[in-house]
Amino acid sequence: MPAPRTLFEKIWNDHVVWVEPDGPAVLYIDLHLIHEMTSPQAFAGLRRRNRPVRRPDRTVATVDHVIPTRDPNRISDPAVQEVLAAIRRNCAEFGIRLHEVGSEHQGIVHVIGPELGLTQPGMTIVCGDSHTSTHGAFGALAFGVGTSEVEHVLATQCLLQRRPKTFEVRVEGRLRPGVTAKDLILTLIARIGIGGATGHVFEYRGSTLRALSMEERMTICNMSIEAGARAGLVAPDDTTFAWLEGRPFAPRTFEAFRDLTTDEGATFDRSVSIDAGALEPMVTWGTNPSMGIPISGAIPADASEPALRYMDFRAGEPVLGHPIDVVFIGSCTNSRISDLRAAASALKGRKVKARVLVVPGSQQVKRQAEREGLDHIFREAGCEWREPGCSMCIAMNGDELREGQYCVSTSNRNFEGRQGKGGRTILASPLTAAASAVEGRVADPRKYL
Amino acid sequence: MDPITSFRGKAVALNQPNIDTDQITPANYTKVTDKTGLGKILFAHWRYKNPAFEPNPDFPLNRPGAEGATILVAGDNFGCGSSREHAPWALVGYGFRAVVSTSFADIFRSNALKNGLVPIAVDPATHREALEAAEQHLELEVDFPAQTITLPSGRSASFPVDSFAKRCLVQGVDELGYLLAHEPDIAAYESARKK
């Protein structure tokens, strides 16, 4: 009998091309996703060495970070024009498929990979973007890399990697109404800390995970990096296969993926358990994603002083009820159709009391939402319905907060200035964001179920 | 990249934990196609009062005596957040050769080493002493091949470096060159998987 192995070990071992004693593994990468922000210098490196892209057929590009979401074709910033021109030129010259502005499948890289069926169980996937961990929801080992490594993968389809450690996150029980996947991952990050999983790959397991939809699993895996983890994994199951079936690049059969699970008796380097039934909707009060509390709670007494100063919050006070200026519903964490449906359910027939941006994650999500009439619900409530892109998650595309503004955001990072210099971000689920939009203050979504 | 040996340099302190890559290089300044010239945007939101780059006199890098610093001493979990390699590009562009902390985020550590920026993770006592020295803009000495850092008191402490990354940086081995040398193995792997 071979020794029992974790899901991570199975995928890792399957992709090691070569490894020398005490050296890093040459790890084969099945799918390389590219966007405009972190790729230009990698292509410049290829040109300097006069190298081709080894597997353009395993490389897929989109534009998302710098795209204006009001009118993607009206770009006045010369820096944006330059990086867009660079990715167009690079993809044309090296033979890479680019999902361009206005094309059928343009969108946030971590939304389009899965929806095209490019993301598949058992794969290794990288992208010059830390939220590549999203794709782990399909049982793929997916992680973010720097631009030097983007160049390495372009040139060789491989990366030099040390094997990370494994970290089991066992979640049992049923989430209560109004408590979402976003609240679950914010709870985990608050519990173990922003660097709590450095050097590790999470595997999310347990009855709660089995009951979650693919989009909920993506939300969870997406934020693995916010606890410092390289990646997050969920073993594929019938939910995974049903979601992938029929997508343009999806496999035709799924039987081969059935053994992509952690074997009985396999051990993890670390482990943590969460009781899903005890969770509440979460909100952050500080300047990193681990600074979160249940919505009925108070900011801890030992809260970081610089974070409180930046947010203009005080220890011991609640976040619930605090007035807000902006609500952002979007990002690779929460811009999929189920996120928009959740937000629309709370907004239907109501008016918002804040500036609200609703930004679908992809053209496909946008079309689906419009088929369902969600855009009407958002517009009638007073929200702005935008074109797909990273938008106000990263504030490098024209969508940003003004100094001092408070924003309830469905994105992944509340770092200082992340949504614009001096802007104050409160991370929450789409449901909490929509409820807060209705009240113009941080609101408990459970009133709107 | 030139091989790294030993160096001595003025230290400056940024005593905060969890300094993320959005602070090191705010996204709005990363719309670039080159990796050089980013020293100016390093810590831009903290370092400047406004988009016209008017210096904020309270920021440690702008204080008298901080000029010419080559070693940054920062708090725990330096470089968390985004994978952007703009962060080490900007640190190197500014003139930093090493960052001293108690720990580093994974992607930042990897990105730093690829750009000759040495992430020096030390024990809390050494870190406290390095911070005190850096508050006074004193010099620290880094012996990269020996993996030691020497404080003004004369006390030395060791720090970990990935053995392969060290070989690359000390001998000037190019990581991509190493990968390219494995081309036959990669081709064999691909053809074996096709079957």
Image (cartoon, coloured by chain):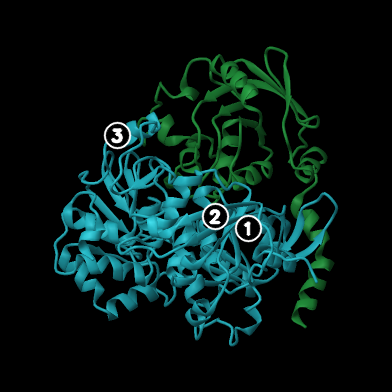
The residue nearer to you, when weighing A423 against A210, is A210
Indicate whether A207 appears above or below A326.
Answer: below
**Type of amino acid at the residue the image marks with label 2:** Thr
Residue A107 visible, this orientation: no
Q: Colour of chain A?
A: cyan
- Identify which residue is drawn at 18% across, 58% down: A438
Identify residue for label 2.
Answer: A38
Q: Split into 4 quadrants, where in the image is the N terminus of chain A? A: bottom right
Q: Mark 1 or mark 3, which has the lower sequence index? A: 1
Residue A18 screen position, x and y as percent: 81, 62
The residue nearer to you, when weighing A286 against B87, is A286
Q: Nearer the viewer, mark 3 or mark 2?
A: 3
- Identify which residue is drawn at 34% across, 58% down: A429
Q: Chain of mark 3?
A: A
Identify residue for label 1.
Answer: A150
Identify residue for label 3.
Answer: A316
Q: Chain of mark 2?
A: A
Residue A429 visible, this orientation: yes
Q: Colour of chain B?
A: green
Q: Determine which of the numbered discs, if any, sits on residue A292 in the image.
A: none
> Label 1 neighbourhood size at 10 Å, few (<14), some (14-19), many (20+)?
many
- Identify which residue is drawn at 24% across, 46% down: A320
Residue A128 screen position, x and y as percent: 57, 57
- Distance from disc 3 to disc 2, alpha carbons, whole Å, reads 41 Å
Q: Secondary structure at mark 2?
A: loop
Q: Mark 3 or mark 2, which has the lower sequence index? A: 2
- Identify which residue is drawn at 71% across, 54% down: A163
In screen coordinates, is A429 left or right of B143?
left
